[in-house]
Image (cartoon, coloured by chain):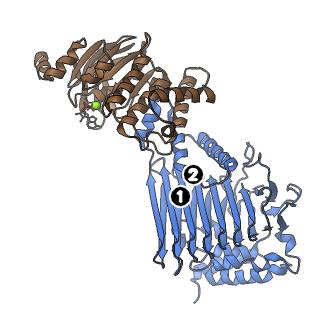
Amino acid sequence: MGLPQAKLTATEARLAALAMPEAPGWTRLGRLGARARLEAMGLPGRRDEYWRFTNPADLVTPAPVPAAVFEPSENPVFHAMDRLRLVFVDGVFDAAASDDPALAGVEITRLAEAQALDIHWAAELYGTLEARGQEPVERPMAALNTAFATDGVLIRATGRAEKPVNLIYLHKSDTSDAILHHVIRIEPGADLTVLENGPAAARFNKVMEVDIADGGAFHHVRVQGRDHERRAVTHVFARLGQESTFKSFTMTANGALTRNECVIELTGDEGVAHVAGACLGDGSDFHHDDTIFITHDAERCESRQVFKKVLKNGATGVFQGKILVQPGAQKTDGYQISQSLLLDEDSQFLAKPELEIYADDVACSHGSTSGAIDERALFYLRSRGVPRAEAVDLMVLSFIAEAVEEIESDVIRDEIVERLAQWLARHRR
Amino acid sequence: MLEINNLRASLEEEGKEILKGLTLTVEAGKVHAIMGPNGSGKSTLSYVLAGRDGYEVTDGSATLLGQDILGMEPEERAAAGLFLAFQYPVEIPGVGNMTFLRTAVNAQRKARGEPEMDAATFLKEVRARARDLKIDAEMLKRPVNMGFSGGEKKRNEILQMAMLEPKICILDETDSGLDVDALKLVSDGVNAMRSPDRAFLVITHYQRLLDHIVPDVVHIMVDGRIIKTGGPELALEVEKNGYADLIGEAA
Ligand SMILES: Nc1ncnc2c1ncn2[C@@H]1O[C@H](COP(=O)(O)OP(=O)(O)OP(=O)(O)O)[C@@H](O)[C@H]1O
Ligand SMILES: [Mg+2]
């Protein structure tokens, strides 16, 4: 079956502007496979059902739409924490700005260097989880990433990491077009926290494949912010073994376009997967999309999706979330909530929550709401002396709380709350 | 302390006039009670004084310690010393009672140019006052008024009042929903706050509250106006005969 002409043309034009690394080494097969997938699927277009609420046009053009570099004046998030920093500038690893990647219990190599080797532990994973995630929904932007990624890190945790690994993305060029691909393997019983923060690049395409073996735990906290014009599409593909844990939280503030996909497979009994997000958007040039797909393919697993969006001055928020319970995945406990707080009538929230269940002994619930600030509560707070703006912030933070509470570490949670409060204070009115 | 002069106010949306030229003066150190039939505008008066949206003041004035309050934002009125204990306190999911109280106390102090209350002092004060009102620690931890019974909500209003130390306290049917013991607790809380530089405006339907909080002056409000003012004996008269005679007298 051929692709529609428009899609074919767009895909060919994009491919013409991309090149695989000269010596892809062990990534070669993974990349070629991904390229073939991409050619078969074609790049996403406005007509695609999965992109109904988010126009992918700016993500697929041969060259990125220029995005002004944004230099935040305050310290970057996580700066006060003891963590191992790995810095990417416009998608290229910067060794000088990074810490020595030596960390007890963790092996870290850079993709651009590691692929020169003949063999590597990541060989069997690179592009593998991404390929699995192409069913039943196509994710061509992720296939593009696997085929053409220019850099990334390969992280293998064999024990309890003594501190978090912090991937830091810096945006220095107006026209950067970064494609990063990370592979993370959590060995049985190992435990790792990965922090990520941007600004990222003018255009940013990132894939993170996370394979968690039995009893492993992976914690992920990401902050996407302070970069008003950048466009980003990111994918997390996670596969969970028995009794393993995956917890991911993303805070997004600003950004012209962000599409965060998270695709999780629970393949071993009693796995736990939580994905949460808090997004703050101000202005009609803000568009944020969380697209989540969680597959339960084992017994007694738990999954939670908690997404909160605060939108004002014409901002748009999107949530597409699915829980798929495969035959035999008995005692599944699935929960999904997506809510938006619209601070004015110009902003909009588009949601598509879905449940698809093929097992009979499961407990799944989902809900989606869209609301405004409760004026009665606002007056109550003000009547006690809390100024209007502060009262609104207090209510916004309480609205977001359920998502933020998904962060396990107190230190990180406090830092995130602080950043959210600062953003709100900067964006009053 | 609080001077209301010929106050007229209508519902913004319907244009219906509720307060129809209301005049009332509450002196410092005094307790005034307002009684009146359902729908006479007592809560409306309290909302208009506190600055809630949805009402249009078409005539008259209201001053607190000589300051015109009608032009102020609700938070400015609070900082100026006005407190309203709501007839129906609002539940606010997600906002912790303690966070709320502390934010309120410090916002008012900031507005008045006073230093913030430090965390330790705040905690000590809240605990002591909560104990007096038999509000347990678990309730303090919950979100504002969430899952509180009707009576617990009213006690929580008094706790806020005690922490905020206002100049004029307007209590809108604080006695409704209270059991006999809670009524006593709340009244004791109010009486403990009576002082020469603080005044109370107590809206109620029942004499039993006024047995505990003995008023200096009682006003009868009917159809948006004060139709009669007297001493505590006026409340007893209402209790015995209802409003019919008073309304007839005024007409
Ligand atoms: N938002 C509103 N919309 C419509 N009518 C209103 C509104 N607020 C008040 N009213 C009307 O205004 C009148 C006065 O109401 P208010 O609540 O002030 O009375 P009240 O004296 O406090 O009565 P109660 O003793 O029952 O508490 C009533 O007729 C009421 O129906
Ligand atoms: Mg009333």
Q: Is residue A226 above or below residue B211?
A: below
Going by the image, does A100 lie left or right of A214? Answer: right
Q: Residue at x 33, y 18 (%)?
A: B213
Under mark 2, the amino acid is Gly
Colour in which chain A is shown? blue
Image region (quadrant) for ligand 1: top left
Q: Chain of mark 1?
A: A
Q: Is residue B37 above or below residue A211?
A: above
Confirm or reject: label 2 Cβ below 8 Å from ligand 1. no
Give the quarter of the image for residue A257. Answer: bottom right
| B72 left or right of A38 in image | left
Q: How many marks?
A: 2
What label does residue A168 carry, if any?
none
- Residue at image point 73% right, 59% down: A193
Report the quarter where the C terminus of chain B lies: top left
Q: Which residue is mark 1?
A: A317
Cβ atoms under marks 1 and 2 closer than 8 Å: yes
Residue type beneath disc 1:
Gly
Residue at image position (48%, 76%) is A357
Nearer to the camera, B137 or B200: B137
Which of the numbered marks, if any, corresponds to residue A281? 2
The chain shown in brown is which?
B
Task: Give residue A117's position: percent from left, percent from top.
Answer: 89, 77
**Percent x, y of residue B51:** 39, 28
Q: Secondary structure at mark 1?
A: strand
Query: Is the same chain shared between marks 1 and 2?
Result: yes
Of residue A199 and residue A118, the one placed in the foreground of this image is: A118
